[in-house]
Image (cartoon, rainbow, N blue to C red):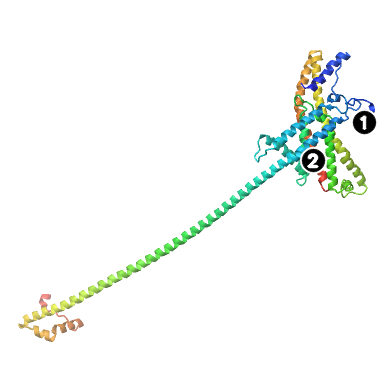
Amino acid sequence: MSPIVVSASWLPAVAPAAEGEGGFETPGVKDFWWPLVGGDSPWTLTRPGLVLLISVGLLAWFYVSATRKLTVVPSKNQFLVEGSYNFVRNTIGRDIIGSKDFLQFVPLLLTLFTLILVNNVFGIVPFIQFPTMSRVGIPIVLTLIVYITYHTVAIRRKHGVLPYFKSLIPPGLPGWLKPILFVLEFLTYFVIRPLTLALRLFGNMLAGHLMLLVFIVGGEYLLLHGGNLFLNFSGVLSFAFSIAMTFFELLIEFLQAFIFTLLAALYISDAVSEHH
Amino acid sequence: MITASVVAAEGETTGFPSGFPLLPHPAEMIIGVIAFAILYWLYKTKVVPRLEELYEERAAAIEGGMQQAEQAQEEAKAALEQYTAQLAEARAEANSIRESAREQGAQIVAEMREQAQAEAARITESAKRQVEAERQQAVVQLRQEVGTLSTALASKIVGESLEDEVRQKGIVDRFLEELEAGEVRPEKIAPAGQDA
């Protein structure tokens, strides 16, 4: 059992004794608050922060060391590096942004994909067991980077802010429709896209891990404090289900990393393209 | 930061904003920026250029291999064409040789036949000539002998030698000439009674 699960399971175990009500405290967002160094302040180094730094260390070590000696016929490590690189470069980058401009965005896409994937998978890796992206600040940072990138590229490609705004309106529209569409497009590009991009990743990771937490903490509560045999057995069933959910989570974790990178590439391809 | 200001407004020192549980934590955002920056810098300066270089190398290797294969194929094609041409040439040559041999054979046969015919004609001719000569010889000899015999016979009948006279006057010769010319008819000497 991971520390987070242990900690969460403590609370309901202690709480009934303290309150004497026999209630079950459902796990919530507060369970993801995990200060490590610096006390209880906005500048505390938290567990997800540490996990994020560890993931960066791992990724940097792996990719830099594996690409130090590259051969035309790949070795085992190189095969893994090339597989992930191919996926980001060709499937996401080249196919969406287009073979003309995609190369300059490959480092960005690769960073996003590997960082998000590793941090997501950390959610079910034993002893780490914390999906970094379930802390909203980190997806917001990544989204901001994508947001700034695609707007900068678009303004540069369309030669200025005003031409960029003009290009938001598709050509060949009747005059009265233009303002309405401009508002819609502006909202899409400047509000909805970054909002959904950040919240999708954050929400999926938070909800998925929260669900695992509910099944494990709840199962533990049922097993130990259920009071009768039927409820105890339900606790065991809950544990079993949490294991199944863990595999499901693995799929979601990969999918979310893929979707985030894919959408980032899509927004960049919009910015790069001549029309719209 | 929003979080910081909210927290400050509430006058709390806690890092977890209980009033707004989903507000981002500033320290995590800063760490997020640092993490992204480090990884992006490493990828941009080291990982991606190395991999792209490898891609180019590999593409060049594959292209080179394809070029080589193409060249080999072209060479094979040229060789095949050459062989085919040579084969056709050889076949034509063999044909012409066969034709000329046949012609030559026919010519030889014709020549031989001619030669044989000429030889046969020559042999026949010489044989004829020999026969003629022998016949002449026989005629001369016969004439001589007939002359001698007839004079001897006549001498016996007459009772005196007519040889010199016969020789002087050429009687036998004249007789024979007349015989040849058909002036003298053979007469039956034997008696008629015996004939019947």
Q: Which residue is mark 2?
A: A265
Proximity of marks 1 and 2: CB atoms separated by less than 8 Å:
no
Q: Residue at x 80, y 41 (%)?
A: A266
Q: Is residue A35 visible?
A: no
Residue A40 in percent (x, y) is at 87, 24
Disc 2 residue type?
Ala
Q: Chain of mark 1?
A: B
Circle 2 packing at 10 Å, graded few (<14), some (14-19), many (20+), is many
Measure how far apart labels 1 and 2 are at the Cα level. 34 Å
- Return the x and y of residue B50 as percentages of the image width and height: 71, 41
Can you tell which of label 1 and label 2 is closer to the viewer? 1
Identify residue for label 1. Answer: B5
Q: Quadrant of residue A97?
A: top right
Q: Residue furthest front?
A: A38
Residue nearest the observer in this picture, A191 or B191: A191
Q: Quadrant of residue A91?
A: top right
Mark 2: which secondary structure?
Answer: helix
Quadrant where the N terminus of chain A lies? top right
**Label 2 is found on which chain of the structure?**
A
The quarter holding residue A239 reads top right
- The verdict on a common chain for dots 1 and 2 is no
